[in-house]
Amino acid sequence: MKIKLRLLIFMPLCILYSNLVSAQSNEELYAKGVKYREERNYKDGFFVFQKLMKADSSEISYIQNGSYFYSKYGYQQASEAAKQSYYKTGEMLAKKSIKMDAKSAESHYVYAMALGRINENAGSKQKINSSKLIKSEIDLALKLNPKHPGAWHILGRWNRTIAGFNAVEKLAVNALFGGMPVGATYEDAVKSFTQAVVNEPKYKLHQYELAATYYDMGNNAAAKVWANKALALTTASDDDRNSDTQCKALLAKMK
């Protein structure tokens, strides 16, 4: 009888201790994943948030970061088919996070990013059809968090993409939006990328994209300034090294 009583007391304590250890482990793992995100270490961050999502699929921050890393790590995959598979999963997770909290800027940001990734190598028709949804999501993200650097970056890419469309493509955009959307010019792309730089000044990619936009506008002087500014920043990740390569290629075009 005494043994049964001890077991009845001991077993709940074991379960409580196990839950506390698991929660602590998840917290530590999450902190590590956030650090990987800050370091642009997309591979390790991806695997961390895969584990966390398996451990607790109801935690929105796990889902949001999971979507983010599926889009970012997916870009590093060798084949286009593999990339698209990652991007689609990122899209699915982003939609899930929006259902969990429609007022989260991060949820709308990762959704727009996944859609943008899916569209990167798509044909004009798909890009045009998706452009309205991407714009809607990124506008929501910036309304909820006007200082979100990633959201400003995507808006810059969106503005530059539409600005670079040919006359036929612009007619299709005009029909989709019921008139040309607000923005969608190189000047607006410059403003967006500038805001991304203001809110995240040490990220090379923002500065490279600003340089690339000035180049597309025919403003080589400004393009050179920003490409060199990006190169002057510390190179600490594969992401940074890729931006360095792009900046050098851009500068080589202007010699």
Image (spheres, rainbow, N blue to C red):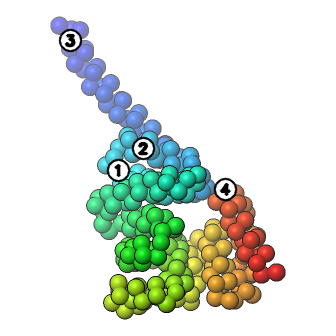
What is the CA distance from the residue labelled 1 to the residue labelled 2? 9 Å
- Expressed as whole percent of the image width and height from the top left, the position of residue 187 reads 56, 89
What is the CA distance from the residue labelled 4 to the residue labelled 1? 29 Å
Instruction: Examine the rendered structure and indicate whether residue 163 appears above or below residue 232.
Output: below
Instruction: Examine the rendered structure and indicate whether residue 116 appears above or below residue 37.
Output: below
Q: Secondary structure at mark 4?
A: helix
Instruction: Examine the rendered structure and indicate whether residue 246 appears above or below residue 20.
Output: below
| Residue appearing at x 69%, y 89% in the figure | 219
Residue 4, numbered circle: 3
Q: Of the two numbered discs 1 and 2 on the same chain, state the one appearing first in sequence.
A: 2
Q: Of the two numbered discs 4 and 2 on the same chain, state the one appearing first in sequence.
A: 2
Instruction: Examine the rendered structure and indicate whether residue 248 appears above or below residue 64.
Output: below
According to the picture, the residue beneath numbered tag 4 turns out to be 238
Give the mark toward the camera: 3 or 1: 1
Give the mark toward the camera: 4 or 1: 4
Residue 46 vs residue 139: left or right? Answer: right
According to the picture, the residue beneath numbered tag 2 turns out to be 52
What is the CA distance from the residue labelled 3 to the residue labelled 1? 37 Å
Q: Would you call the spot at circle 1 few (<14 residues within 10 Å), some (14-19), or many (20 or more)?
A: few
Residue 59, numbered circle: 1
| Residue appearing at x 56%, y 87% in the figure | 186
